[in-house]
Image: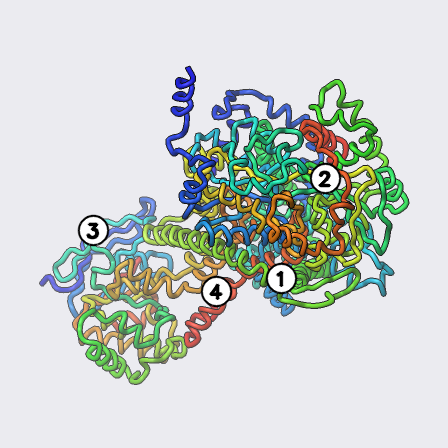
Amino acid sequence: MDDGLALRDVTIAKAGVPLVRIDHHIHPGEALTVMGPSGVGKSTLLAFVTGTLSPAFTATGRIMLDGHDITDAPPHKRHIGILFQDDLLFPHLTVGQNLGFGLAPGGSRASRKARIDAALAEVDLAGYADRDPATLSGGQKARVALMRMLLSDPCALLLDEAFSRLDAALRAQVRDLVFARAMARQLPVLMVTHDVEDARAAGGAVITLA
Amino acid sequence: MLGPLLAGIYGTILPAFGHLPAAGLTGPSLDAFRALFDWPGLPHAVTLSLTTGLTTTFIALFIVVGLVAGWSGTRSFRALERALSPLLSVPHAAAAFGLAFLIAPSGWIARAGSPWLTGWDRPPDVLILQDHWGLTMTAGLIIKEIPFLLLMTLAALGQADVVRARTVAAALGYGRVTGWLKCVFPRVYSQIRLPVYVVLAYGMSVVDVAVILGPNTPPPLSVQIVRWMSAPDFNARLLANAAAILQLALVIGALLVWRLGEGLVAMLGRRWIMAGTRSTCDPVIAAASVTLAATSALAIGGGLAVLAVWSFAGFWGFPDALPDAFSLQNWSRHASGLGDALGQTVLIAACVTLVSLALAIGCLEAEHRHGLRLTQRGMWLLYLPLIVPQTAFLPGLQTFLLNAGLDTGIAPVMLAHLVFVLPYVFLSLADPFRAWDRRTATVAAALGASPNRVLWAVRLPMLLRPVLTATAVGLSVSVGQYLPTLLIGGGRVSTLTTEAVALSSGGDRRAIATYALMQTAAALVPFALALGLPALAYRNRKGLQHG
Amino acid sequence: MRSLALLAALAATPALAQTDPSDWDAVAATAQGQTVYWNAWGGSTTTNDFIAWVGERVAEDYGVTLEHVKLTDTADAVTRVLSEKQAGTDTDGAIDLIWINGANFAAMKDADLLFGPYAEQLPNWQYVDVDGKTVQTDFTVPTDGYESPWAMAQVVFDYDSADMEPLGSMQDILAWSQANPGRFTYPQPPDFLGATFLKQVLVDLLDDASVLSEPATDDNYEQVTAPLWDYLDALTPTLWREGRAYPPTGTAMFPLIADGELDLSISFSPGAASAAIANNELPDTVRTFVLDKGTIGNASFVAIPYNSGSTEGAMVVANFLMSPEAQVRAQNPDVLGYGTVLDMEALSDEQRAAFDALDLGIATLSPAALGAVQAEPHPSWMTRIADDWAQRYGVAQ
């Protein structure tokens, strides 16, 4: 019953003016889509969930993940993965090193390499481990970013306009991939977008901010 | 970092008003100021200080603005930018020596044209170096300040939407220069205001360039302060402190005048903008600025070339264009002295730069983690040690350290260097650090990386290029420091810079050339490495090749 | 009564007792491992090389490390010691040895800033020419053993024999300069050599220069120096750059001669021109001359500040500087070309032979040709004349 990502009475305000109010429980394998025009505070909500809210904002309410209150946990202890509209692959590392960065510590060098290779194969990028990320196409980068995030074993997934930079054909393809992987892992997904197609593909509840 | 500054000013004010208990003098008294105003050289020394500072700043700014307005985005601009940028790290003293060897009546230019063009078989008896009005000294400062202001302006341009502003202005019928001046300059100037003040204050109080190129009958106020500081008689010391206070007042006064001038220019500028004048003398400004900038790049480059020739020269009489013979004798005879001075220079520069990097990165990282941002007032504090004239607080700092029993060894010199190195390191790191995409940190944290791991494994490697550039800047600033090394080191700490300037009084051109070249190398090599290392380390990383 | 005074004197000695200079073995033993910071003018490559050589030799023989602190002005060192005294740094000050003479010595001796007496207790003092050379007075001030001599200097004029003939008096120099404007100058006082030029003018112009051996007084100063200012008023417009700029030091005039800007300059080292020719700094047509009535001469000394932490090491260096080995090297025009302070009669045959074997160089006058040495005026003259010069010519309009 407690599993999943719960936002309890969350209110985010700037200079005393409330921007976002939300109270919702996202169960494992479910998605919640937050929509609204730009500047309305969608990304601010995600920053609160990842623990990177700028001090200019104040937030109340609790964030519960699988029954634990993570509201005050530092960002790197929250086990919440996030994808932005840019792939944000680390440009100084190879594709494989990027995945290795995300992979939770432990295991022998060979087993880690095997997991990385398997992850790449899962998204049709087998043999790309030694590539410079800058040489990849947009769709390939998006897939690497997704797998990097998934390898860190997150307990929830946030999507911040994650598909808006991709062109129409690619967008549907990547979106389907992301949701397929998230559902396969039974992750709760919180997505902000301004694209109705995204919301439809997510299939869950939709909250529109104004 | 303001500690040494305040201690220095405090240590200067007390003796200036006749309070020096150690010497049995208790103040307050105005005797030192009375003696200062009785010095017959004062009016000229003060005038020199003012004219040098204001002229240097005005001309250097004019050239840089004309250059950027008229040429930015063109191929010749990129060529010039590439030629000027490394010159930023050429130490002031080396550039001044090079200029002197180039334009003196017996310099390379006169040699090249004699006797076939000029008919001279002896150098003409004309006062070029050490001229009464300090014009040569001003020229020497201008050629060194152009690269500094240019790079500062280019950094500021990154934050102004120049290309689109120019397109819009051009569509409205404005010429290149006029359009830039009206649309971009006001935004850029507010960003480079503090660097401009640094140039102004530096030009008014410089010592090493003034010793090499400036007049002596009388010298500029700053040089006279250093002389009085070193006179055996105690009253001269009080006089030096009084003059240091006067120097500080002059710099403050000049800054106020400049500030008023800014207001005036802004007012006239707004009227000019409202008048809708299209192109006025665009081609003239563009041509003048590019000529002057190219000349100054050539002056530094040619200066370094003539230093190189002198350092290998056998006997070289006038008007021969080249020496009778070349030899390594000079380098070998100075080898051990150069080695010692280089070791000392590198040790100081490396320690100071390392500490500065740690402090600056720590500060910027704290800013990042806690979401803070340096305010305009904070920027002023950062710039303060660069604006307060060195001659105004280093004498006091020396007395202060002496009283605190910290006067010997290399550590106080490093501390004094830190005051000047840290701001430059911070300034060169700040923009790239702040421009770094915060979401990268969010992604890394979401992947489970702690803030320290994000810093070491993601942020610093991605910012390797700016970190190395800041390192090079820090090293070259430290290498070039003359007065802090001389005064705080009490003569025991000799770097390439203090050795080179000490040699200037002896007039041995071969020795001067050798030391000045070595000094230049000590400052330039780190820059070459800063450019080369990331290219090497990231030769297979396309995403970082233009970082 | 006497023992009480002795007791008081003992009580006043600093806790770190300095070794008795006359106990040379103890001095040498304590000096082992010390570092001596020698503050000496650093503007001349030849001098710097010589000091470096001294450093190697004292390291070999005595285990003393010598660090040359290169000064632009000896007064810097004096200030340093003064400010250390103010700050109460009475032991292990920054300076262990200073190349000094004249007004700086007088000032330091006056203010009790020197260690000593030590000079005449040093082993090599036995070779010093006490009778023939002014090694026990410095600008008429008795040295009293507070500084030890290491070189003799005498004013000579360097000239380019390709362009002019030797001149016999200051009046001749004025007349020549008027006929050849822009070809002569002197370093800007208070530079040591520049101030010496002023004194040389005065000594040569006065019929009887004996008045200069007493301190200057308010009563006689103006009248005695009047001929000097008349002379300079006439000379200055004919100088290099019309007297609107001056070279900072003596050696800074070498390149001016080498380039042909100057034909005539002044030097305080009879052998410096030969050394500079050997070093490619001067053309080989340069020669030297002295005035008919003779020129001013003096000795260069080293002194030890009262708060040196390495007095023994400093004495070792001072003693080595007076050794026949160092002296013959200093006199070698290929090295320094400085005059020796030693008495040839006091040396062994072998030591003397080393001096005789020296080729003094084409531009160096023989000891006989150097002629009479005129005494330095009392330092009070130099101080006042240098100040006056600065007022009259140092802030040229």
Q: Is residue B296 visible?
A: yes
Task: Name the amino acid, label 4.
Answer: Ala
Tell me whether the residue at label 2 lies in contact with that at label 4, contact meaning CB atoms closer than 8 angstroms. Answer: no
The structure residue drawn at horizontal position 49% and vertical position 42%, both measured from the top left corner, is: C314
Q: Quadrant of the N terminus of chain B?
A: top left
Instruction: Name the one closer to the observer, C287 or B462.
Output: C287
Q: Nearer the viewer, mark 1 or mark 3?
A: 1
**Residue at which label 2 appears:** C194
The structure residue drawn at horizontal position 78% and vertical position 28%, both measured from the top left corner, is: C209
The secondary element bearing badge 1 is classed as: helix
Q: Which mark is residue A61?
A: 3
Q: Is residue C308 above or below residue B348?
A: above
Quarter assignment of residue C19? top left
Q: CA distance from mark 2 to mark 1?
A: 28 Å
**Residue at which label 4 appears:** B530
The structure residue drawn at horizontal position 66% and vertical position 27%, both measured from the top left corner, is: B37
Task: Name the amino acid, label 1.
Answer: Asn
Can you give x and y, in whole percent of width and height, for residue B219 in the image?
Answer: 68, 39
Q: Is residue A168 visible?
A: no
Q: CA distance from mark 4 to mark 1?
A: 30 Å
Instruction: Name the one closer to the observer, B219 or A142.
Output: B219
